[in-house]
Image (tube, rainbow, N blue to C red):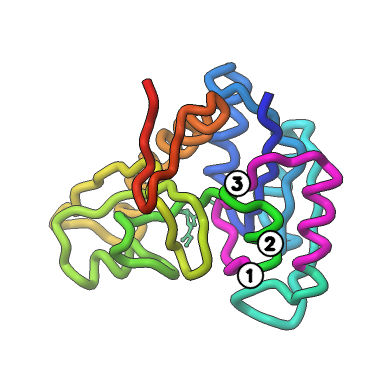
Amino acid sequence: MLKIGVLASGKGTNLQAIIDAIERKEVPAKIGIVLSDNPDAHCLERTKRAGIKALYLPAGRFKTYLEPEIEKKYINVLKKEGVELVCLAGFMRVLKKDFLNAFAGKIVNIHPALLPSFPGLESWKQALNYGVRFTGATVHFVEGGVDSGPVILQAVVPVRPDDTPETLHRRIQEKEHIIYPLAIKLIAENRLRIEGRRVKIEE
Ligand code: GAR
């Protein structure tokens, strides 16, 4: 059974989708621990409610990444827990080299756009402002950089003429909640091969 660690900063609806899919036995994995950089994050509530270990680890002085000493703490806690795959689920900080090396090829992220379009914050607003007809969600392996790395799965969401940022994000999240557990299932079943930038899915 693949042991996963989840890093989250916010509402935790993706975390919930993963918890639910594991409970329904659709994903052969177990969540060892959930870490958050936000003490008020609803994701911590969800974790405790599901009987999963949850830990708030303050991020330190910087806004967009973890202070190096603190990043070491994150790594140590995850390693101690025996985590084999790190899932970023709305974790709003960029991970640095030490973390990427500690879990090389074993970190995945969900992003609310069809990458490489609209990386960064509030991608659904970026998509609306740009005027694209279609946007979506992406699950990808994490490498250095913001929301970059080989794509595992994507789902397309049409932009409606009357969409607001909220309605569009809600529909994107419905897709996120499907493709994130599915991507984790593929990893847990050892069915993904990274070949350069492309990820092959074995039958
Ligand atoms: C999700 O839409 C996720 O794709 C996004 O944060 C939201 C978290 O929602 N992540 C990023 O923008 C990463 N760049 P959740 O807390 O309800 O899962």
Q: Which residue is pictured at 36% across the width and 53% down the height?
A: 197
Residue bearing the label numbered 3: 106
User: Which residues make up the magenta segment?
Assistant: 71-96
Q: Quick one: quadrant of the C terminus?
A: top left
**Which secondary structure lies at badge 1?**
loop
Compared with 195, 185 (above or below) is above
Q: Is residue 120 left or right of residue 56?
A: left
Classed neighbour count for the residue bearing mark 1: other residues with Cα under 10 Å, few (<14), some (14–19), many (≥20): some
Q: Amino acid at mark 2?
A: Phe
Q: Amino acid at mark 1?
A: Lys
Instruction: Give residue 73's position: percent from left, percent from top.
Output: 83, 62
- As drawn, the residue found furthest toward the front would be 195
**Which secondary structure lies at badge 3?**
loop
Q: Is residue 135 left or right of residue 175?
A: left
Displayed quadrant of residue 194: top left
Classed neighbour count for the residue bearing mark 2: other residues with Cα under 10 Å, few (<14), some (14–19), many (≥20): some
Compared with 104, 70 (above or below) is below
Q: Nearer the viewer, residue 100 or 41?
A: 100
Residue bearing the label numbered 2: 99
Q: Amino acid at mark 3?
A: Lys
Please indicate, yes or no, whether residue 48 appears anywhere in the rendered image. Answer: no
Residue 96, numbered label: 1
Q: Earlier in the sequence, mark 2 or mark 3?
A: 2
